[in-house]
Image: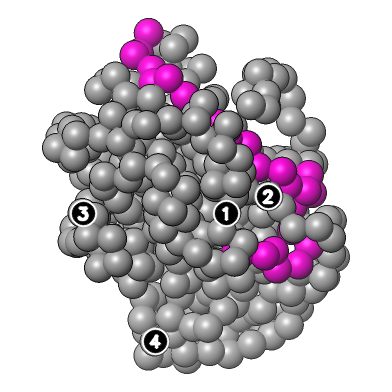
Amino acid sequence: MESPVTGLERIVLDHDLRARAIGARHIGLITNFTSVTRDYHRAVDALIASGIRVVALFSPEHGMNGTAQAGHGERSTTDPRTGLPIIDLYALSRDLMDEAVAETHADMLVFDLQDVGTRFWTYSSTMIDALRAAGRLGLPFVVLDRPNPLGREAVEGPLLDERYESFVGRVPIPIRHGLTLGQMARLTVSHDARDGLRTADLRVIHAFCPPSGFMGEPTAWLPPSPNLATIGTARVYPGMGLLEGTNCSEGRGTTHPFEMFGAPWADDRLAAYLTSLALPGALFRAVSFMPSFSKHAGDVCHGAYLHVVDPTAFRPVRTGLAVLSGLRELYPKDFSILPSSSPGGRHTIDLLWGSDRLRRVIAAGDDVTPLAVEETRIPAEIYPPDIFTAD
């Protein structure tokens, strides 16, 4: 299969496109270690070499170098290769983000980060927050788009209920959303304009990518977090990420997070139960493991390993709901939803699902599997056609 062509590569190789989109502006680049060309040169170095004036670097969750675990950024510092300031944008408030951007004196923001195709992946929230900051500050915003590794052929899961908007869900899209981040940026501008907000002058340098996502490891796709090391992990993440809102280990602290899951109170019955469901594209085997950190750290856990044997048929959200159903049915005295830990009293699983409906169905003892949308072509009522327009 021919490798995708990213927006970064197009802007570096095409002088006329670069002149039209960026010109002589001084840019603040939202980037990290995933922002590379196909021969693994950093975006900032490739852009500077092409004559673009970069004045500051902004980093998301996990930091510029990817050393930070989930829920953390790296402290603001200086890039040793270029001498440029690196400003940590992770989870900044609106006012602090506006201040951070304004202090760099950039007259344009350029965004280039690798997405994983899941609504609760925070790189998209950083993009949306920076895009809105650009609108408030009157700055143009350019997205150097990258392929969605899960493709655009199917979407799954509920639309985000806007009452549950958070840093793991900024706009009303499904969990497996089927968008590139450039398309998501266009959708955000459309929604914000409808709501009367000041929006940025948005330009998307689109990527050429396969419609069904990556069947193998694509060229120059780097693990975007310490716990998402492969495309295989990205495939299961939209469903298995829901376990973060429960007392079951999602495999953090192991070498196979989100593909391996369980708890000290689980056993081989979980893999047998999931196998009996004959879920499309998935096989399960019983495993035992000991997380080195996160939930059940230092304890032997028993559970299952999820193998995706047919990526085209596999439905991650449907599979994640089946796992939740099995945990509740087999271990009713041990399995639980984690209590609220946020100031607003919202449960983690509600923020991940996009509403409190999944939690209420689990609490009532009802079947959760019908909540999954098995295969939905992208409908116009969810996504306006103009967000897919190429430059």
Viewport quadrant of the C terminus: top right
The residue beneath circle 4 is 292
**Residue at figure coordinates x 78%, y 48% from the top left:** 210
**Depth-wise, is mark 4 or mark 2 nearer the camera?**
2
Residue 128 % position (x, y): 41, 34
**Gap between marks 3 and 4, in whole Å?**
34 Å
Closest to the observer, 134 or 303: 134
Front position among marks 4 and 1: 1
- Ranked by sequence position, the earlier of labels 2 and 3 is 2
Image quadrant where residue 174 sits: top right
User: Are there few (<14), some (14-19), or many (20+) residues within 10 Å of tag 2?
Assistant: some
Amino acid type, callout 2: Val
Residue under numbered circle 2: 5
Q: Is residue 105 visible?
A: yes
Callout 4: SS: loop
Give the mark, 3 or 1, whose residue is nearer the N terminus: 3
The residue lying at 35 percent from left, 67 percent from top is 65
CB contact under 8 Å: marks 4 and 2: no
Q: How many residues crowd around disc 1 within 10 Å: few (fewer than 14), some, or many (20 or more)?
A: many
Q: Nearer the viewer, mark 3 or mark 4?
A: 3
Residue topped by disc 3: 85
Q: Counting other residues with Cα less than 10 Å from the Cα at mark 3, is it few (<14), some (14-19), or many (20 or more)? A: some
Assess whether residue 199 is covered by the magenta stretch: yes
Question: Could you give the CA–CA distance between mark 4 and mark 1, rounded to whole angstroms?
Answer: 25 Å
Residue 38 in the image, given as x and y percentages of width and height = 62, 62
